[in-house]
Amino acid sequence: MTPREHLHRDYGLLTGFLRRLSFRLQLRRFLEFLLLLPSVFIVILLGSLFVIKLKEIIPYLPLFYSLVALLFLFFFLWKGLRPVFARPSMERVARGLEKKFPELKDDVINSLLLFQEMRKGSTEPISETLITAQLRKTIDEVSAIQPVEVVSYKGVLRHLRLFLPLFLTFSL
């Protein structure tokens, strides 16, 4: 294999790992959204029970509550679905990885930037051997990390602590 082929292979390995992390992050956000959505509906429905009882005292309360509930629901849908469909950039994922594993220092982001600089064909020539060595070092460090260590799905379960009591309250 030529040094250029090694360079592209190593860059492909690094970006593949970062893409897997990005997908896991999007999936986690989607699962969190799916667990919070029924909780939001239950809170809105429980609130409507109080509105029904208070409509004799405040006649326009059902209209006002309906408008506020719809606005809140649309806001929640927008706020919850936007991160699911917006894929984080490679640099953002790399920064998150480096923040979670400080021993990586700036290796991941530097590898990405060096390869992109070389691809652009900067005015100052950058040694392909240097970039290949940097990428190889980064790949060796990153390959020891499991994606589960970076993005865990255990955080999704914390939303069950909100959903289960609300579900029990609503079902009674």
Image (cartoon, helix red, strand yellow):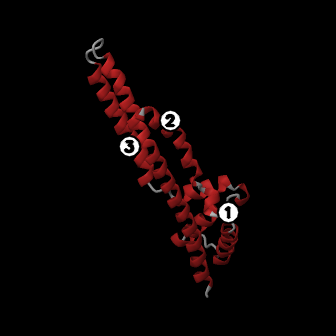
Which numbered mark, 1 or 3, is in the foreground of this view?
Answer: 3
Q: In which quarter of the view is residue 59 placed?
A: top left
Disc 1 marks which amino acid? Asp
Looking at the image, can residue 123 be seen? no
Mark number, residue 165: 2
Looking at the rendered structure, the kind of residue marked 2 is Pro
Query: Callout 1: few (<14), some (14-19), or many (20+) C-alpha neighbours within 10 Å?
Result: many
In front: 100, or 156? 156
Residue at x-position 67% and y-position 63%: 107
Residue, x 55% and y 68% (percent of image)?
15
Q: Earlier in the sequence, mark 1 or mark 3?
A: 3
Q: To which residue does mark 1 refer?
A: 107
**Residue 119 spot, x, y in % from top left:** 53, 72
Q: Nearer the viewer, residue 10 or 145?
A: 145
Label 3: state its secondary structure. helix
Within 10 Å of disc 2 (Cα), the crowding (few <14, some 14-19, many 20+) is: few
